[in-house]
Image (cartoon, grey):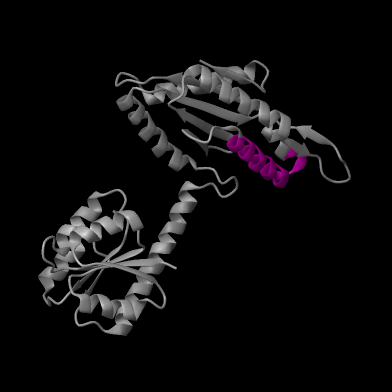
Amino acid sequence: METILIVDDSFFNIQLLKGILQKDYNIIYASDGEKGLEIAKVMQPSLILLDVEMPGLNGFQVMERLQSLKETQQIPVVFLTGVDDTATEEKAFFCGAVDYIRKPFCCNVVCARVRTHINMFKYRQMLEAQMYIDVLTGLYTRKHCIDHVNKQWKQCIQDKTPFSLGIADIDFFKRVNDTYGHQEGDRVLNNVANIMKQSMPEENNYIARVGGEEFFLILTSENRDRVSEVIQHVCKAVGQKCVCKAGGNSDQEINVTISIGGSTIIPSERDSLDDFIAIADQMLYKAKNNGRNRVVWI
């Protein structure tokens, strides 16, 4: 059940809206702007119904704060007001509101508008999930990875902590698709992804599928020796556990392996992330040239 936060200094309005909506939604509320902000950050509601005129922080000030916070900036907000003038309505939309409902409320209109914005919010979440999560493997996508890598790189510069990037590639994957079909190729991709996830530490790690059979493995706060040990374990685990099934009447199984190249650095402002990624890619190239099913790490 989706959660709706009502922020209104009128207890009567809160109870009225709660009575209208509580059958279909989980209703939480606050009687002032400061409390509303605190609840929004913690509860992450799917929609906020926000009164314009309140003592302390008014609705526009609350809206400004909501949009400045990472935790709340994507939550849709519908303004509620007894003020009936175009300037206030225009200001509400200019501030980022998705809708504007005048008091006194019409119950059917409130229900219809809330339902519309909840559905739009859920649809947007679904689209974002498709953008950031690879449907086949459940790993993060290239788009998510680009954002994450940049963020972690900057954080490591600030904290003066190690940043490690491994680029993994499934060996002879084209041969798998060409020989055994794309369905078996998809199964291999999913299997490799699961084995890598299970072989990585529980904390300070990240895996994304950035290409057809290419993956980024990112570790932070670990020294080079520890990272090399982890990556060697990942490579070995895939080679031992992942098989390609010949299909048909054959019981033949062929081991699938990966090659990984990468590097560890404590980055500074002088270092280039693009250059660092290029070095990791060069290490992958060396791993391939040196016979595959191995790790090359510097």
Q: Can residue 69 be seen in this view?
A: yes
From where the camera sits, is residue 257 visible?
Answer: no
Residue toward you, 6 or 112? 6
Residue 39 sits in quarter: bottom left
Residue 259 falls left or right of residue 26: right
In the picture, the quarter occupied by the N terminus is bottom left
- Would residue 260 appear left or right of 19 to someone viewing this image? right
Choose between 107 and 189: the one closer to the eye. Answer: 107
| 105 versus 66 height, above or below | below
Estimate the x, y position of residue 110 in percent, counting from the top left. Answer: 30, 78
Q: In which quarter of the image is residue 211?
A: top right
Q: Quadrant of residue 90?
A: bottom left
Which residues lie in the magenta part?
178-198
Q: Position of residue 207 (x, y in %)?
A: 52, 36
Q: Is 193 left, or right, of 159 in this rendering?
A: right
Task: Name the residue: 32% across, 59% down.
Answer: 75
Q: Is residue 294 above or below residue 43?
A: above
Prevailing SS of the magenta stretch: helix
223 sits to left or right of 255:
left
Q: Which residue is drawn at the image coordinates 54% and 32% (left, top)? A: 201
Which of the pair 283/229 is nearer the observer?
A: 229
Residue 156 lies within the magenta run: no
Q: What residue is rendered at 85% in x and 37% in y? A: 252
Q: Is residue 179 magenta?
A: yes
Residue 231: where, in percent of width, then height?
57, 25
